[in-house]
Amino acid sequence: MPVGGTKDTRGKDVERARNLIDIHRYPEAEAALRRVLAADPDHFGGLSHLAWLLYLDDRLKEAAEVASLLVTHYPNAREGHRRLAWIHLRRRRLVEAESHARRTVELTPDAADSWTLLGRVLARLPGRVDEALAAADEAIRLDPHSGIGYEVRARTHSRSKRWSDAEAALTEALARAPHSTDNLADMALVKMRLGKVEEARGLLTNCLRLDPSPRAVRGVIRDIETNGFCEQLADVHTLACRAVGRPHLNEPGAAGEDARLLTEQAWLARTLWREAKQPEHTWPRAAAEQARALVTAILAADPTNRVGREAAMAIADEDEDHVAAYGLATGLLADGYDDIPYMHLVAIDAGVKLARAADALDLARVAAARYPDHLELACWHWRMLLATGRRTEAVPAAERAALLAVESPHRPVLELARRETDSGTEDAAVRVLDSVLTLTSGAYVGRLHRAGLLLRAFNFVDAETLLTSTGAPSDDGPTCAMLATTRLAQGKWARALADLERAFAAPARDLTVPRLVRDNLRDWGVPHALRGVYLEALALLGEEDSSAAMAAADRANLFYGLVGLLMIAATADNPEALRWARAVAADARALDPKHAAGSAIEAIVADPESADARTFVETVRTRLAAAATG
């Protein structure tokens, strides 16, 4: 058994270091822990506390290395897996975080904090809301007096924009921990989403009163700025900024030419750009535009600012501005900033898009040597060797990538590409590799994000145009699934069902596709004509059908909402939309024969040229416009 907490000399040193960590005296704590590990490199307490110290000090790469050593030496102790789960969660490596969080639960299934950790990870993964809530509920069952399980429930509901449910969960959390500044801050953000500005202001002011430390105050500032509440909460924002002697960095130019402030502002810009792509963000377009404005001002003040250049590179990559992305990425690499694989990926991908195959190959060679265990970079190296006619070198590169892909969901596809490489069919191998590498490119992520914004604004026509534009992938799973959503809303169900078949048959499909299909069809109540596709998605996920558990009236409301979309799309050029509107209305009527709107909507779909039908369509348009801008 690990013995890091025993009262031997080294154990006392570790205990002293733990106390120093608690009061944020990290350099002294690190020195003590390094002395322990110099004498005993496998010391459990030394490794565990050093990993946590590095995590708290934002040295995440070092923290991951130390925590990995802890797992290697003590594979059946939960602490290493728990540390790694937290570190990977912070680094947004959610697949690895889930793996270690699940191992933590396996090792200590009766520990509530193991379940809350798993819940936190699952809440960040697309389509895993139900699992996250189940993990939080198990934590609550194991420790009903703790507020952490309710906190996880609240954050999970927030990611689904279920603000009232989040408010209820946070009320329970605060009943158990009334002075938790994290919960008070979360409740303030939820109150803002519910329009309760004065309550939110009081909660954030209380946070500042309870913990006036610079770290806590900066947390309040971060919450206000990254969620776009600077205007509504101007007084609290100003008070907090004054407390730490910091200007309003949400305003372009506020950092002046101060290197430290410019870097802090650049981190804000990166966060805004990243968070704008999260489905729960309230104002994604505004956040993205603010990030652009900040980056422009930062680079105007200091063109050498690393974080600002990285933010500009990410924006250019996702905007498909390959010239700018290539220049920024290769410039950063030339300056010695090669410690982030993403930078290499952007440079290589942009080089390929700009038809600079020889340069892309050179970049891929360097990246594969710098990160020999990175699957995507190994695949790029392999692909560029094939694309430049170096099949002899490509064969061992393919073998290396295949070894790295042992636990990847894309392993079958990469094995196919390896066989194509071995047999000498280079073009076929490149096409197969592109089916995987496309899914990781910034341009692809950016296109899906822009399509998602259009869907949120109920602009299904422009979303369809974007997803079918020149250069857009034609057979990847997520694109086909999103394209199906745009066409279902427009009444083009025959084409939408074909899109869904392509999504399920995509060569590089993972669980993202069935989750997208499941969630989109649930949002419309699962009409009868789409039930087969819905059940196919559930089968791939290994889930049971829960749509029948929804109240009949609630499900009928979803059906009638879909009818409204289909009636807008029903024109002389698109008679299919009217046919499906009638079918969905019939589904709703069968489900809830006494629904208050049933008879009226049946009459509207029966006579789409009537005055009532025109009024209905205009009302739906008005409500959609209000929802899109609200």
Image (cartoon, rainbow, N blue to C red):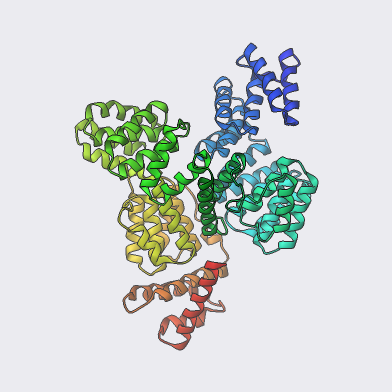
- In this rendering, position of residue 312 left or right of residue 26: left
Instruction: Please say if 620 is above or below 249.
Output: below
> Furthest residue to the bottom?
611
Identify the residue shown where x is 67% and y is 35%.
111
Of residues 544 and 566, the one drawn nearer to the viewer in this rendering? 566
Of residues 607 and 120, the one drawn nearer to the viewer in this rendering? 120
- In this rendering, position of residue 62 left or right of residue 179: left
- Regarding residue 295, the answer to whether it shows in the image is yes
> Furthest residue to the left?
424
Q: Which quadrant of the view contains residue 2?
A: top right
Instruction: Please say if 307 is above or below 535.
Output: above
- Regarding residue 127, the answer to whether it shows in the image is no
Give the quadrant of the N terminus.
top right
Total numbered labels: 0
> Furthest residue to the top?
39
Q: Which quadrant of the view contains residue 361?
A: top left
Instruction: Please say if 431 is above or below 87.
Output: below
Q: Position of residue 93 (x, y in %)?
A: 51, 38
Give the quadrant of the C terminus.
bottom right
Of residues 230 and 410, the one drawn nearer to the viewer in this rendering? 230
Q: Position of residue 180 (x, y in %)?
A: 75, 45
Q: Position of residue 363 (x, y in %)?
A: 35, 33
Of residues 196 and 332, the one drawn nearer to the viewer in this rendering? 332
Q: Position of residue 550 (x, y in %)?
A: 56, 62
- In this rendering, position of residue 590 left or right of residue 206: left
Instruction: Please say if 33 is above or below 234.
Output: above
